[in-house]
Image (spheres, rainbow, N blue to C red):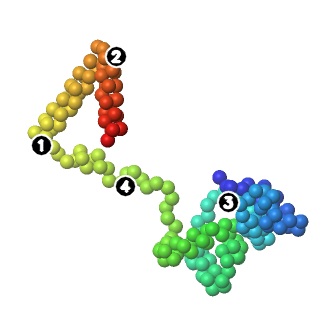
Amino acid sequence: MAKYSEEFKIRLVTEYLEGNIGYGSLAKKYNMGSQTSIREWVNVYKSQGMDGLNRRKTKKEYSVQFKMDTIQFMLNTGASYLETAVHFNLNNPSLIIRWTKEFYEQGVEGLIPKPKGRSSVSKKPNKQKNKEEKKLTREEELERENELLKLENAYLKKLRAFRANQNAFLEKHKLNWHSNSKKKDSD
């Protein structure tokens, strides 16, 4: 969700354009941390009208050539991010900041659109399948089964003891827990 609504932006822009109040005073009046946003909104409104203040309903994909032209314009003219955004009818100067950063870090490859969302689960190798594919010898299968039966047996013994005398079982385990915690505290 956007930080400021379209109505709020329009109210501040019209209030500024009426000429009664400056950027800093508007920022203070509406408890905004900075006057930069108001300045951007006014410049976008002057160049694009109301459409510039409206949020885009869908994300627009920009071509690599458009991104390169935008960065090249800014470098050749010395224009700021905001001036460049206004020149290319972009309502978000932070797009140009991101494109410039990606271009400096990765070159033209950084400007190529990346697929959105999570990758498909089917494309990832499934570790569980790899384990199943590894065939166990007959002896290993019997050892694994034996281990599982031992665990099940131990669990059932504890369950029977608990059902037979719940209070004694809980008291025994509480004492063990307290004595273990005291040992840790004294260390």
The residue that appears at 49% across and 61% down in the rendered structure is 115
Q: Give the SS element for disc 4.
A: helix
Residue furthest to the front: 186
Residue 34 in the image: state x and y as whole percent: 72, 64
Question: Which residue, given by chain and number where applicable, does mark 4 sit on?
Answer: 123
Identity of the amino acid at label 2? Answer: Asn
Where 102 sits versus 138, above or below? below
Labels 1 and 3: the sequence-earlier one: 3
Identity of the amino acid at label 4? Answer: Lys
Question: Which image quadrant is residue 10 in?
Answer: bottom right
Q: Tell me the distance, in whole angstroms, between the alpha carbons under discs 4 and 2.
A: 52 Å
Identity of the amino acid at label 1? Answer: Thr
Question: Which image quadrant is residue 83 in?
Answer: bottom right
Identity of the amino acid at label 3? Answer: Arg
Question: Which residue, given by chain and number where applicable, does mark 3 sit on?
Answer: 56
Q: Tell me the distance, in whole angstroms, between the alpha carbons under discs 3 and 2.
A: 65 Å
Residue 177 in the image: state x and y as whole percent: 33, 30
User: On the picture, is 60 further left or further right than 184?
Assistant: right
Tag 4–tag 2 contact (CB < 8 Å): no
User: On the picture, is 136 further left or further right than 69?
Assistant: left
Question: Which residue, given by chain and number where applicable, does mark 2 sit on?
Answer: 167
Q: Nearer the viewer, mark 4 or mark 2?
A: 2
Which mark is drawn over residue 44? none
Question: Which residue, given by chain and number where applicable, does mark 1 sit on?
Answer: 137
Where 177 sits versus 159, above or below? below
Q: Tell me the distance, in whole angstroms, between the alpha carbons under discs 2 and 1.
A: 45 Å
Instruction: Estimate how packed mark 1 is, as few (under 14), some (14 to 19) or many (20 or more) residues with alpha carbons within 10 Å.
Output: few
The residue that appears at 63% across and 86% down in the rendered structure is 76
Q: Tell me the distance, in whole angstroms, between the alpha carbons under discs 1 and 4.
A: 30 Å
